Each structure stands twice: as C-alpha cells, then as structure tokens.
Image (cartoon, rainbow, N blue to C red):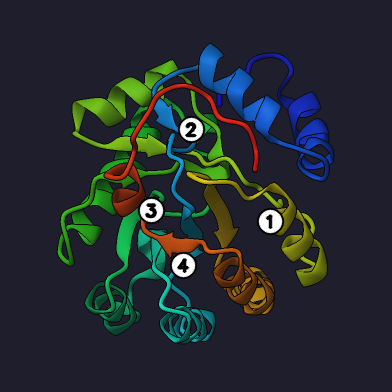
Amino acid sequence: MKICNTRNLWFVLLPLIGACTPRPLVRLVERTFPGCVYDVRTKEKIVALTLDDGPDATTTPKLLDLLREHNAHATFFLISDHVTGNDAIVSSMLKQGHEIGNHFSSKEASIRLNSVNFLGSFLRADAVLRKFSPVRWIRPGSGLCNERMIRTFSDYNYQCALGSVHPFDPQLPFAWYTSRVMLHEVYPGAVIVLHDAGYKGRNSEKALRRILPELTKRGYRVMTLSALQSRETFTEPQRRE
C-alpha cells in the first residue's frame, strides 16, 4: 500500500474501514498500486492465514499446536532478530507444513527506512531465514509499501503479500472483535492477516480457537500463501457468498 502525504489519515481510517468491510478498499489499492498479492481469485472455499512478527518462545508453539489440531496451515512472516534462540520453533513450523516469509530484521515501519537501512534490514533477514528454507514471500513492516520497495523485492525474487482481511489486531487486541471481523469478512481466496508475539500472539490464539472451527463448519480450508496462490482459477472479481 503506497502512502503519500495522507499517511496519518490512512492510519486513522484503516481500522474504521476494517471494522465494516475492507474489500472495496483492497480492490481500490490493488488497482492503484499493483505489485503485491492481496488475495487470490478462486471459487473454492480456501483462504491463506498469515501471522506476522514471530517467532515467540511462548505464543508461537501454542499457535502451532492449535493449527495442527485443526489441520490448518499458515505462512509465518518472521522478524529475523526474533529467530535467535527460537531456531527449533522455526524448524518445527516447516516440519508441520507451514511456510516462512520475510518480515525484515527488526520491528519497524519499513517504508520509513532510508534506502541503505531498508536494503540492509531486508537482506539481513533474508540471510537468516534462508538457513531454514527457501523464502519467496515478503511483507514489509507495518504492511505499507511503495513502488521502490516492490521493485527491490522483485530484484531479489521476492513477492510482496499484503492481504485482504485485516482485523487490525495490534491496535484492537480483543479476541471477540478479531473473530467477528474475520468471520464477517472472509471469502474464497482471502488472505488473512494476524499477528504473533506477546499480547498479539495471545489474542490470535484466542481468536483462532473461535475462527478455525467455524471456518471448518462453513467448508473452508486454511492454507499457506503458496498453496492458495497455486489454486488461483480466474481473474475476474467475485461477489461475497
């Protein structure tokens, strides 16, 4: 998502829009600022679950247990500074069929970094994560990007993924609210954005305990970004079911 002089306004409006329906905003941003994956066009009841900011020694194992319990898979966008001491957790993610993505080396808004610091943070994270697995997905810190950033990602064979269902859980860490927004907004091909680590991971665990069984009842399967993208079947926008 490209932020110009209206950056502060976006930070105010996005949570409010997310509380209603983000899909018109997603479509607008997608058309205006192409180059990132927001969702996948498909009629199948499949969605991608993504979790940012891990790994965390306390919350990530609980999330992995919960996903295994519901036969669900996710793409974990990892901050490489958080990997130190949590190597076994990252290895466990991959063994359980999840995938990892690049979320830079530290927790900061990537769009605010100058060119040198931006590239340095991006490549430091790449070097750490590639010790575990090939990495193809990237999500900039704070989920905001511009054309320069997208070009850089492409130069290093990365694909940017932003997502389409945002409960804004870092700002509104209430499991009932997270669950309500996600279950109201979910649709075939959606990319769900949640967070791990600390209070965010605890909120995601509580919310997913409500969300995953309900998605199963609705006939949905929860998978990684790569698995979802491989199932894209058409390019025309679809209506919510």
Q: Quadrant of the C terminus?
A: top right
Query: Viewer-proximal residue, 204 or 121?
Result: 204
Q: CA distance from mark 4 to mark 1?
A: 20 Å
Q: Is residue 6 above or below residue 125?
A: above
**Sequence-first disc among 3 and 1:** 3
Residue 165 image offset from top left, x and y in percent: 62, 46
The earlier-in-sequence mark between 2 and 3 is: 3
Mark-to-mark CA distance, 3 and 1: 28 Å
Q: Secondary structure at mark 1?
A: helix
User: How many residues crowd around disc 1 within 10 Å: few (fewer than 14), some, or many (20 or more)?
Assistant: many
Mark 4 to mark 3 CA distance (whole Å) = 11 Å
Amino acid type assigned to the residue bearing label 1 in the image: Met
Q: Which mark is residue 182?
A: 1
Instruction: Indicate which disc, 2 or 1, sits on the residue closer to the N terminus.
Output: 2
Q: CA distance from mark 2 to mark 3?
A: 12 Å
Residue displayed at 44% across by 34% down? 41
Element at label 3: loop
Residue type, label 4: Gly
Identify the mark nearer the N-term, 4 or 3. 4
Q: Amino acid at mark 3?
A: Ser
Question: 10 Å neighbourhood of mark 2: few (<14), some, or many (≥20)?
Answer: few
Query: Separation of disc 4 and disc 2 at Cα?
Result: 21 Å
Where is residue 213? Give x, y as percent. Answer: 60, 76
Q: Which residue is mark 2?
A: 113
Q: Residues within 10 Å of mark 4 (few under 14, many from 20)?
A: many
The residue drawn where x is 19% and y is 34% is 157
Q: Nearer the viewer, residue 161 or 126?
A: 161
Residue underneath mark 3? 105
Of the residues under marks 4 and 1, which one precedes in the sequence? Answer: 4
Q: Which residue is mark 4?
A: 54
